[in-house]
Image (spheres, rainbow, N blue to C red):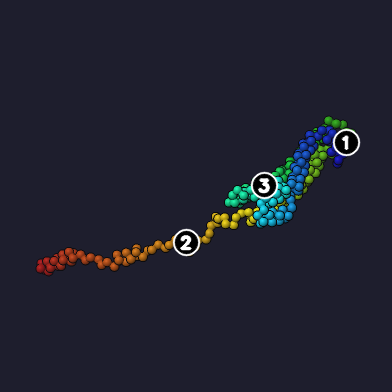
Amino acid sequence: MWSQLAISLQAGNTYLIFILIFGFIGTTVIFERFLMLQFVYLIDFKKFLKDLRRSVQAEDIDRAVSICKKASNTSLPNISLKALEASERDPASVRGTIEEETIDFLPKLESRIGILPALATLILLIGVLGTIDGLWSAFDSIEILDTSEKQARLANGIAGSLNPTAMGLLLSMIFLTGHQILKGMAIKLTERVHYGVSVLMNLLVPTDMPTFVAAPVDASMAAAPVNNEPIIQEMDDMESEPEEEDDSFDDASVEDIKDEEEII
């Protein structure tokens, strides 16, 4: 297989050239992300937080700042440094500073890792397309050849057409494996940064800061019930008032009855 790949590259196979270009890009991304995650962002979080907690509890801010600068200029030390500077300026802004720096840093852990599966898929598809093109050319070329040369030309054409797919499969497996490894490293670092941010919150955020969490409604704070007694009393008075008798109606009725008796 490797000899056939070398022969195809020397012949200038266009599909192999494109596969190698995308393969170089993906390999660069894997090495760059590995170096950043393993040697730049990764620190001894346990030791760093222990020294930082000791300095802050001793109210030695200068030593805490020095610890942050010595550890790293990024990752959790940079977040801690910004929080310490904010605590000296305005203690009320510490929480907001920590949240802003954390939101700004966390996406950097998984930066460019997501393009590896896309590159793997693209390389594999280019390899398949190169194989189809090679088979097509091999079958077309045997129509103009003599019978004695057809078998040899067809065999060489089929063997050469499989080279792009073989190279695409190889690089796709490497990229997908690298993606899984880098993804796991990024998730692990994210969890450690979240833990460190929680420690910073407990150390630097003032305990007397007002919180805006909705409290349950107290019985004393509940709305006073509406006093409906006057309305009820008024309705009772209206019902208890006797209806006025219509005296005029009664007198007229009696006189009419008397007139009818006289007529009779």
Q: CA distance from mark 3 to mark 1?
A: 60 Å
Label 1: which secondary element:
helix
The image quadrant that residue 258 belongs to is bottom left
Please tell me which residue lies in front, 47 or 14: 47
Q: CA distance from mark 3 to mark 2?
A: 43 Å
Q: On residue 221, which mark appears?
A: 2
* Residue projecting furthest to the right: 148
Q: Position of residue 180 (x, y in %)?
A: 74, 49
Q: Amino acid at mark 2?
A: Met
- Marks 1 & 2, CB-CB < 8 Å contact: no
Q: Position of residue 160 (x, y in %)?
A: 83, 37
Left-right relation of 242 to 96: left
Q: Residues within 10 Å of mark 3 (few under 14, many from 20)?
A: some
Q: Residues within 10 Å of mark 2 (few under 14, many from 20)?
A: few
Q: Residue at x 71, y 56 (%)?
A: 50
Q: Position of residue 143 (x, y in %)?
A: 82, 32
Left-right relation of 261 to 197: left
Q: Earlier in the sequence, mark 3 or mark 1?
A: 3
Please tell me which residue lies in front, 72 or 115: 72
Q: Residue at x 80, y 41 (%)?
A: 167
Please tell me which residue lies in front, 77 or 220: 77
Say which residue label 1 marks.
152
Q: Nearer the viewer, mark 1 or mark 2?
A: 2
